[in-house]
Every structure is written in structure tokens, then in C-alpha cells.
Amino acid sequence: MDESALRYFASQGDTRRVNAEIARLRALYPNWTPPSDMSQLSGTVTVDPIIDRLWNLYKEDRIAEVRAAIAERQSSDPNWKPPEELTTALETTESRRRLTNASDSGQWRTVLNIATENPNLLTCVNVDVLWRVAEAFAKTEQSDRSRDVYTYLLTNCANPGERLATLQKALGLLPDNQVADLLQFERKTGNEPDNFDSIREELARRRVERASNDETMTATAEDLAVVERMTRNSDEPGPVLVLAWYNYHHGNPARALELFKTALDRKGGNKAAEGYAMSLRALERLTEAEAFAYDWHDKAPENMKVYLDVATALLSQDPPPRLETRIVARIVPIAMSQRFPDGAQALGWYAYNTSQFQTARSWFRQALGWRADDEPSAYGLALTTQRLNDRAGFGAIVAQWRDRSERIADLADGTVPQAAQPRVPSIRTAQPVDNLPQVSLPQVSMRPAAMRAETPRTFVETSSLPAETRPRTVTVGTRTGARRGCLVTRNPEGLAPDAAVALGWCLMEANRPLEAASAFDEAIRRGGGRTREEAAYGKSLAYLRKNLTSEAAVAAAQAPQTGERRVELSASILGQRALAAYRDGRYVETILALSERARIVPEQTDLMLIRGWSYYKLGRYQDAEKVFRAVQRTGNSEDASIGLNAVLEARIPARQ
């Protein structure tokens, strides 16, 4: 055992080097005990100017000069040898440098070979070397060996900062369960106790993050509380984003929206903006979502995708919204530039629902140009071509799609009336299609509100009634005695009651229900008997067309109605109230309205589905299951299966 280096460092009064050398010698010779009085070592050193110079060079980390000086001395005195301890120290330093260079270059096998050949490097004196060896094991898929190195460090090395750094290194390389196992080595006593709380917080944050990306995983209350605390104790957006995404993917978009807003305030960037827009979308605040998402749409591919999704949902609302010109004007070029078939389809339905059939046909054609197998767009194209009385074009579409689309075949066979308004189909999420030619399409025109025709549609609740009770005046051309091309620009004031009623029905056929309501109101004020009854009936339908259920109920009471019409109007009003309550999340009111409606008319499949989902939202899974199974028996297996699967998944945690 060579103590010359220890003696030299002691003679120089270099305490750091003395302690490092003692640690190295202890690792090599476990039974060795260092002198209790270092002055005894320093006093026994025989000063050799050459040796002293070599140690000074080594102390300054000038290793190449030490080697050169040794070679020079040996050339003049072949019998001279440097101290063995100096030679060992030089070899150790050079090995450490080679290991460090190999680690920096990602040569992990070389790192392990050097460490194997130089076990004297693997001590607490060289913590950085131990960290690099642990990383090399992890990079060569030997995580257990990597954990062993970290365990050695935590068991033998005393510096608190290095011990915490060891856990931080492990976080980036080991599975979380192995990092958690290392926490057992935390030292709570002594002069310098450990504090590994930051490691525990990071592990909790990771568990919540995994659960935020997987709806089947649920984070524990303890982990959620830890992340909540992290959001309060730091101004960083990271923990807030984790908690926001967890709430979003686990059915709490309102809380997610608040958290994403906080993340935006903390410079959370594109990811926070993506989540904020998606939360607005989930809350059905689509106008806000579109405006916000537009401001971020060109910041990242994910933000562009969210904008397209939000814009598509905005256009696809049922009933279609009245959008400002500027909104449509910015949706159109983005949908075109991204070659987004779902966006083109949504613009097609929007144009169709605002009676712009030429424009709608162009958009459906564009959607099919980008995605040739898109059946909803083909169906829209068939409908618009039929509405435009293009028999040749309609025949060509039917010939191409009859075997692939039951709906298009029904149109051709006359099963679906030409004037029937289709439900807006759900828009599938899809990536833009590349390398297809663009075509120049007209933008969706936006006429002033006073001149724009209202949506020619029948509401869900009235369209689901039996044929004998279905309103006869909601859809264009179905009312007996209605005249095409009738004058709808007349002022109802001063008209005879019968003339005011006729004007009201003309305005209904022109899909201008609020103006129709004014004409019917004039007839109610001045007419009597059958005229007053007809006007009250028409006024009720006009308000129903606009979803104004309270006004419709008041109008219906302004004159006695026949039994058939009372049932029709009551069912329509209750159906619309149920839908409005459902859209607002008032599920108890939804069920009450549907139950009251079911007492006067049979409940149809679409309203049964709303009843089932209301039970589901209230946690009444058994009732929801009964309703969905009843829907399934009507032949609507697809929608019923979605509801039954949701009920089954909701019950799984309880069963477990």
C-alpha cells in the first residue's frame, strides 16, 4: 500500500485532496485506517524537487506535462521510477477522462468496459463517474444494474446534494417503480438529512399525467392533491397542464377550462391553447372556441387540427347558427388550404341548411374530391342535386352509390321525400388529404339577416311524431292551399284576418317564421272563430320553428284548438323543452318533460335515446340500460350499443 500521495497532499495542506485520497484508499483497502493526525504524515515527507514538481503538475490537472516530465527524467536516468501512487493517480485520471468522453459520445459499452477495468474509479470520490456508469447500464437495457449503482451511491455516499441529484438522475432513466424503491434510502436523521419530497412530487405528477392520457385510468386522490399543491407552489405551467388534461379527459371540461386559462397566463403556449379550445368545444361554447382557436391555428399542427375540429362542429350545429360573414370568410380558406374533407362537408351542410343549394353542391363535390369514399358527402351531393332538379346528375350519383349507401338508394326509390330536411350527420375527425388538385369553389354567401331564409327544417321532436300528428306547415309545400311564389313582402298591418293568415303561411313556406308570427298575430287580434284558431296554430308553429317554446305555448292558448292540434302542439313544445334542458345539462328537467310528453304521444327512438343519456348523466345506470335496450329492440342497434357500452364502462369501477 502506497501512501506517498496522501503524504504529499498532507505536506501541501491540501485538505480536499487528502480527504479524496483517504476515501480512495479506504475503497481499495477496507481494513486500512488513516492516521488520526495528518501532521504526522506531512512531517515525514522527504522533499524531492522533481517529485514535488510532478505532484504540482498533477494537482493542476496538467496530466500531459506530468507524463512528459516523467519521460524526460527516465531518459536521463533509466533506473529512476516515479512513485507508484503518482502512476496510479495518473492512470486513474486518464481512465476517468476516457470514460467521460465515451459517455458524452454515447458509447455506452466503452463506458462499461473502462469502468470494469478501473474499479478504483467507482467510489464516492467520483460520483460523476458512478452516474455515467448507471446511465450506461440503463442505455444498454440493464435497468437492474443501473438501479444497483444508484443504490450503492445512496447507501455509501454522504453528500446531500449529490444524493438528491442521484434520485434526479434516476428519474430520467429508470421506471417509476424502481425510482420509488430508491426512496427508502432517504436519511431523515444526522447533521445533513435528505429531503426527497421533490422526487415524490414528480412521481405523483407522472402518475396523474399517465391517467390524463388514458380515460380508463384514474389517479388517486393523494396524487391529485400533490399535483394541486404543485400548481399553487409554483408559477410553472407544467403541473397545471397535467391537471387540466386530467380533468378534460375525465369528464370535467369546466374545471379543465379554468386550469388551461391558468396555464395560458403562465406562458403555457400551444399546448395550453389547444386544451383551452378543446374545453370550450366540449362545453359546446362553439362560437368562443372558434374565435379563440383561430388566433392559435397557425402556431402548431395540433392547434390547426383543433381549429378545424371546432370550425367543423360550429358549422354542423343543429339547428345551424347564424354566423357572421367574417367567421365563414376565415373558415373557408383554411379548410381549402388544409384540404380538409370534413370541413368541406360541414360547409356543404351549412350551405344546404341555409338554402344555398348550388354552393352546397360545390362543397360536397370538393369533400369527395379530397376523400372519394365519404358517404355523408355523397349523400349531401345527392340531396342538393335532387333539390336543384338536376335529374341527370342525380342519376349519376345514384348509379355510383346505390350499392354503398342505403340512404342514397332510398332517395332514388322515393322512400325519402324530396323536401325532407336531413339531420346534419356527425362529422368524423380526419387528417387533411395531400396531393389532390384544388378547385375554385364559391364561398358560402352571407346575406343580411332580414333577407336570409330561415332553415327549412322540421325539429327533431316534431319529425319523430306519427305521420297523422306531424305539423303540416313546417316543411315547404306540405300545407294544403299554400301557393308557390305568393307575395311575402306585404305588411300584415291592415290586412283582413284571412289575408293575414294566408300571408303567415306564405312566410312559413319562405322559412321566415318570426315574420310569419307577426302576420298570424295580426289575424288573432282582428279575426274570430276558425280564422283565430288557424292563426294561433300557425303562430305556435312559427315560434316552435325558432325554438321559442314559451312563446309557442302562449300562442297556442290564444284560441281554442282541436284535440288533434292540441296534442300536436303540446308534444312539440314538451319535446323542445326536453331538448333545451338536455343541451343545458338539466337532466332531471329533461326526464320530466319527456315523461309528460309520453303521456300524450308515443315516445320515438331519438327522444328515447335522450332519456337514456339523461339517466346515464344522473348516474341512474340501471334505468339508462333499460332505455337503451328498448331502443335496441326497435332496430337502432348502433346508437343503443354506444349507450349500453357507456353504461357498462361506468359500472366497471363499482364492480371492481
Image (cartoon, rainbow, N blue to C red):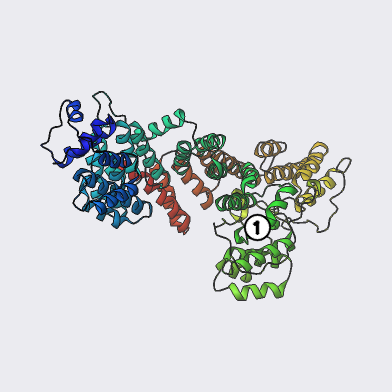
Residue 395 vertical position relative to residue 66 in the rendered view, above or below: below
* Residue depicted at 41% across the width and 40% down the height: 620
Q: Helix, strand, or loop for circle 1?
A: helix
What is the three-letter code of the residue carrying label 1? Ala
- Considering depth in this image, is 294 or 255 the residue closer to the camera? 294
Q: Position of residue 364 (x, y in %)?
A: 66, 64
* Residue depicted at 22% across the width and 46% down the height: 82
Residue 560 vertical position relative to residue 330 in the rendered view, above or below: above
Q: Residues within 10 Å of mark 1 (few under 14, many from 20)?
A: many
Q: Quadrant of residue 633?
A: bottom left
Residue 364 vertical position relative to residue 20 in the rendered view, above or below: below
Judged left or right of residue 191, residue 650 is right
Residue marked by disc 1: 335
- Considering depth in this image, is 337 or 141 the residue closer to the camera? 141
Q: Position of residue 455 (x, y in %)?
A: 70, 52
Q: Residue furthest right?
A: 494
- Whether residue 597 appears in this view of the structure is yes
- Considering depth in this image, is 254 or 307 the residue closer to the camera? 307
Q: Quadrant of residue 121?
A: top left
Q: Position of residue 471 (x, y in %)?
A: 66, 51
Residue 650 vertical position relative to residue 347 in the rendered view, above or below: above
Quadrant of the image for the C terminus? top left
* Residue depicted at 68% across the width and 47% down the height: 321
Q: Residue furthest front?
A: 76
Q: Position of residue 250 (x, y in %)?
A: 44, 42
**Tag count:** 1
Judged left or right of residue 164, residue 34 is left
* Residue depicted at 60% across the width and 59% down the height: 342
